[in-house]
Image (cartoon, rainbow, N blue to C red):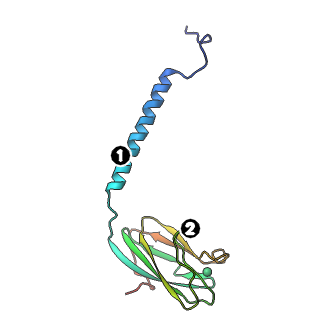
Amino acid sequence: MNDRRGEPPGVDPVLLVIGAVAVWGLILVGLIVAAVVVDEPVEVLAEREIVVELSEFEIHPDIIEVGPGTDLTFRIENVGENQHDLHISDEIGTERIEPGGSDVLAAGVVEGSYAIWCSIKGHREQGMEGRVELTDIAPALPGEAA
Ligand SMILES: [Cu+2]
């Protein structure tokens, strides 16, 4: 019988080997995935311009469905009576748009669904929020520019 009570506490060497192999395996998989992702160019299958209207307190249309590979541009019109803006992330968005004003936001190729919102304090909570939804097909939208 193998009595290990006399040995210093530690990890079984077999487990160490298994752990090392697992770690190297994960690193290898990570490198392969990174190489594939880096090598694959973003394929633009369609360019779409969507007219989005901002008002108190909504974004219209609030659901924008686009197909894979869509290079999306927002043409934003503030039809409300207060300043508004349109954000697609915390970092990316328009400046504040005056009532009656407009702006253009190039959102780039849609790679997944995401939220859009007005970043002015309290506006998102009151309803100025929408979503870009990535779908298999891209139906024509009422707000779409010709
Ligand atoms: Cu707003």
Local SS, label 1: helix
Q: Where is residue 22 in the image (x, y as percent from the top left)?
A: 44, 34
Q: Where is residue 39 in the image (x, y as percent from the top left)?
A: 31, 55
Q: Where is residue 74 in the image (x, y as percent from the top left)?
A: 46, 79
Pick the residue in front: 75 or 18: 75
| Foreground: disc 2 or disc 1 | 2
Indicate which disc residue 66 carries.
none
Local SS, label 2: loop
Q: Identify the residue at image location x=58%, y=87%.
A: 98
Q: Position of residue 15 (x, y in %)?
A: 50, 25
Pick the residue in front: 34 or 22: 34
Looking at numbered disc 1 in the image, what kind of residue is underneath it? Answer: Ile
Q: Identify the residue at image location x=37%, y=68%.
A: 68
Crowding near the residue tagged with mark 1, few <14, some 14–19, many ≥20 C-alpha atoms within 10 Å: few
Image quarter where the N terminus lies is top right
**Sooner in the amino-acid sequence: mark 2 or mark 1:** 1
Q: Work out whether residue 124 can be spotted.
A: yes
Q: Is residue 17 above or below residue 105?
A: above
Pick the residue in front: 97 or 72: 97
Q: Mark 2 points at which residue?
A: 90
* Residue 8 horizontal side relative to residue 40, left or right: right
Quadrant in the rendering for residue 135: bottom left
Image quarter where the C terminus lies is bottom left
Q: Name the residue under label 1.
A: 32
Q: Identify the residue at image location x=42%, y=84%.
A: 144
Q: Which residue lies furthest to the front in this view?
A: 95
**Ligand number 1: quarter of image:** bottom right
Q: Work out whether residue 137 can be spotted.
A: no
Looking at numbered disc 2 in the image, what kind of residue is underneath it? Answer: Asp
* Residue 74 horizontal side relative to residue 97, left or right: left
